[in-house]
Image (cartoon, grey):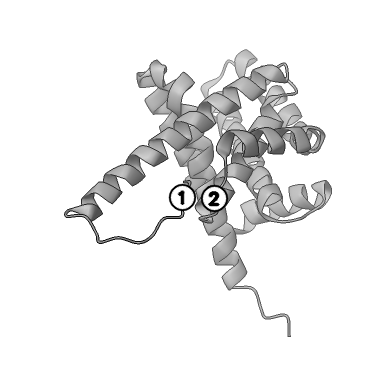
């Protein structure tokens, strides 16, 4: 959300309601713009090499917004996408291989119990990817340590991946019901909500860490 440095004047009547509506419209405009940026940058990277830096850039921009810092979204996203292009692809490569293998086996699976197991494994892999991308945006970590800590976080706090999976499933279900949401809102809402959840997980974990002393 951008601000303009102006003198403070008297509050307008009903200003609180106006501010709430402005905040809601601003949030919708933000996730809509983020949605378009993720789709455009994914296509710009040829999809295979574009989706990981697109999600990484979206997570970084969402973190900035959630912290209350100002940013010019299009410029910030483009800068993050270029800067994280190689790094994000390498970070997401293990998850991409796992997701591709699980998806291939799911398409060929015949028995219901095997399909259910593969769907559960896919959900866990997606949750790990989201944790890794958010952790990479939030902390300064090497790729290997980021992937390892994401797995440790997933195993130690099972509620975290469950919330990420539930959010992903909810957005997916709404998009299936209203396919027109996909090009305008779904991806932006999904990555922003998941980033917000991850940051809340990290903040709760940081509060429980022992003091450095």
- At a point 56% along the width and 19% down the height, the residue shown is 111
Q: Does residue 84 appear left or right of residue 208 in this picture?
A: right
Q: Measuring from the top left, give residue 117's x and y in whole percent.
A: 58, 31
Residue 73 seen anywhere in this rendered image of the structure: yes
Q: Secondary structure at mark 2?
A: loop
Q: Measuring from the top left, give residue 58's x and y in whole percent.
A: 60, 37
To which residue does mark 2 refer?
A: 70
Q: Residues within 10 Å of mark 2 (few under 14, many from 20)?
A: few
Q: Residues within 10 Å of mark 1 (few under 14, many from 20)?
A: few
- What is the quadrant of residue 88 in the picture? top right
Q: Measuring from the top left, give residue 143's x and y in whole percent.
A: 81, 46
Q: Measuring from the top left, give residue 61's x and y in whole percent.
A: 59, 43
Q: Are marks 1 and 2 in contact (CB under 8 Å)?
A: yes
To which residue does mark 1 refer?
A: 3
Q: Earlier in the sequence, mark 1 or mark 2?
A: 1
Picture quarter with the C terminus: bottom right
Between 170 and 179, the residue placed more toward the observer is: 179
Marks 1 and 2, how far apart at CA: 8 Å
Q: Does residue 10 appear left or right of residue 193 in this picture?
A: left
Q: Does residue 173 appear left or right of residue 58 in this picture?
A: left
Between 71 and 45, the residue placed more toward the observer is: 71
- At a point 25% along the width and 61% down the height, the residue shown is 10
Mark 1 or mark 2, whichever is nearer to me: 1
Count every numbered label the image shows and give the total. 2
Residue 194 lies, with reference to residue 7, above or below; the image says above
- What is the quadrant of residue 42 in the picture? top right
- At a point 56% along the width and 29% down the height, the residue shown is 119
- At a point 45% along the width and 23% down the height, the residue shown is 184
Q: Does residue 191 appear left or right of residue 147 in this picture?
A: left
- What is the quadrant of residue 153 in the picture? bottom right
State the mark number for residue 107: none
């Amino acid at each position: 959300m951008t601000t303009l440095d102006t003198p403070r004047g008297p509050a307008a009547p009903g200003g609180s309601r106006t501010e709430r509506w402005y905040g809601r419209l601003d949030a919708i405009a933000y996730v809509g713009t983020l949605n378009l940026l993720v789709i455009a940058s994914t296509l710009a990277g040829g999809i295979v090499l574009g989706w990981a830096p697109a999600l990484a850039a979206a997570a970084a921009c969402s973190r900035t917004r959630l912290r209350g810092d100002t940013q010019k979204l299009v410029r910030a996203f483009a800068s993050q996408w270029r800067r994280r292009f190689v790094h994000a692809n390498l970070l997401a490569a293990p998850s991409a291989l796992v997701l591709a293998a699980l998806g291939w086996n799911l398409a060929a699976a015949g028995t219901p119990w095997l399909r259910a197991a593969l769907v559960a494994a896919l959900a866990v892999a997606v949750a790990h990817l989201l944790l890794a991308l958010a952790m990479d945006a939030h902390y300064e970590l090497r790729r290997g340590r980021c992937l390892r800590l994401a797995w440790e976080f997933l195993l130690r706090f099972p509620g975290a991946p469950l919330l990420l999976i539930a959010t992903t499933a909810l957005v997916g279900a709404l998009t299936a019901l209203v396919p027109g949401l996909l090009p305008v809102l779904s991806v932006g809402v999904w990555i922003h909500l998941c980033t917000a959840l991850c940051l809340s997980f990290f903040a709760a974990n940081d509060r429980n860490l022992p003091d450095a002393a």
